[in-house]
Image (spheres, grey):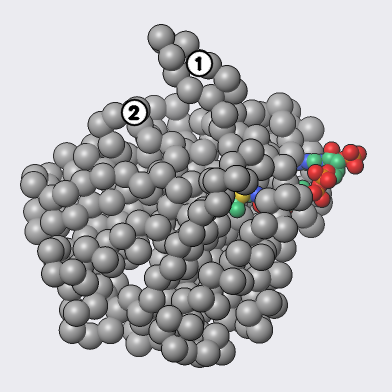
Amino acid sequence: MYARIAGVGSFLPGQPVSNEDLVRRGVDTNDDWIITRTGIRARHLADEGCTSSYLGYEAAKRALDSADVEAADLDLIIVATSTPDFIFPSTACLIQEKLGNRGAMAFDIQAVCSGFVYALGVADKFIRSGSHRKALVIGAEVFSRILDWEDRATCVLFGDGAGAVVLEASERPGILATAAHADGSYNRILSVPGSVCGGKVIGDPFLRMDGQAVFKFAVKVLSEVATECCAIAEIASSKIDWLIPHQANIRIIESTAKKLGLVMDKVVVTVEKHGNTSAASIPLALDAAIQDGRLQRGQKIMLEGVGGGFTWGAVLAEY
Ligand code: ACO
């Protein structure tokens, strides 16, 4: 029994905000610096009041439509997010209500930018065990809420959005291998080191990052974990039709592809359109490759992510 990708959907809020728009809004930066260092040309920023559950719901509806699955028939809903609507209940439960599903197991996963591949891996285990048959896996983020707009080294990198996948139990191949890891000793190189206590923010509620340390770590583990997945599935990395990596930075993506011996023609890149949307970026890129006709049924895809924690993981699947 496999967990097969039955449908995919994604959603970006509002209009794209270009690098020049950020300059006009008062960020001390320029288009050339951002494009050269990151490949990002635009991001989408959710209006006040637009939440991860709203973005996730919009992506989920599109994924359910493309899978031709009714929300009522889902028995598992997992949401990967680091920007939940509330401390609790989970964003998964809020999306469940919006979708009109009752009774499915619903919970959030917190693994920052690796959240989507962590969540897919967990859903795959549930489906392969036979306990669940139809899972909705969502990555949804409003990272703009945790950005310090005075910190130009971070605020230009991120955006808001959501993507979703419906997985169904199937005898036809779907997910072939998953791998996920973490090393908490790297927690300080990327974090939002704040919390709420007694009605007050304790610590720092904004994203802080050591960009160069993150860069080195990301390239190392992304190539390692993709290689690990290929070994589990016993296929050569050259057999991957599409590498669909976390969309953080074009230079991280290019370095990873090079280490895996993949030409950039086999890599799905959408970072220029929406920046780093954390847990949403992989399903956003997956959906883009389906929508533009590049990704065809039967092709092999490697999804992989790395993020705060530090966490990293990959999913090798036949689409
Ligand atoms: N616009 C203009 N200048 C800037 C900006 C900006 N937005 N941000 C920083 N600078 C300046 C700095 O002030 C510095 O100026 P100085 O030399 O006069 O002091 C100069 O640019 C270089 O700064 P660095 O921080 O050394 O820049 P670096 O070359 O390391 O690039 C970057 C920074 C793009 C963040 C890089 O480290 C990187 O890509 N890291 C990966 C981080 C990443 O992608 N994180 C995403 C989250 S993690 C994840 O999703 C996996």
Label 2: few (<14), some or many (≥20) within 10 Å?
Answer: few
Residue 235 appears anywhere in the view: yes
Residue drawn 64% across the image and 38% down it: 188
Label 2 or label 1, whichever lies nearer to me, is 1
Relative to 249, 1 lies left or right? left
Compared to 126, does 81 lie above or below?
above
Residue 250 sits above or below residue 294 on the image: above
Residue, x 34% and y 28% (percent of image)?
A: 86
Left or right, 190 with reference to 239: right
The kind of residue tagged 2 is: Phe
Near-viewer residue (3 or 131): 131
Residue 271 percent across, percent down from the top left: 60, 58
Q: Which residue is at the far front?
A: 185
Report whether 95 appears left or right of 21: left
Circle 1 Cα neighbour tier, 10 Å, few/some/many (<14 / 14–19 / ≥20): few
Residue for point 35% across, 56% down: 119
Q: CA distance from mark 2 to mark 1?
A: 14 Å
Question: Which of the labelled discs sits on residue 89, or is there none?
Answer: none
Q: Can residue 288 be seen from the camera position used here? A: no
For badge 1, the amino acid type reads Val
Quarter of the rendering occupied by the C terminus: bottom left
* Residue 51, image quadrant: top left
Circle on res. 86 = 2
Q: Earlier in the sequence, mark 2 or mark 1?
A: 2
What residue is drawn where x is 53% and y is 70%? 225
Which element carries disc 2, helix, strand or loop? loop
- The x, y position of residue 169, in whole percent, is 18, 73
The image quadrant that residue 217 belongs to is: bottom right
* Residue 126 placement (x, y as % from top left): 22, 63
Residue at numbered disc 1: 201
Find residue 178 and report its horizontal and vertical position in percent.
40, 70
**Secondary structure category for the residue under label 1:** strand
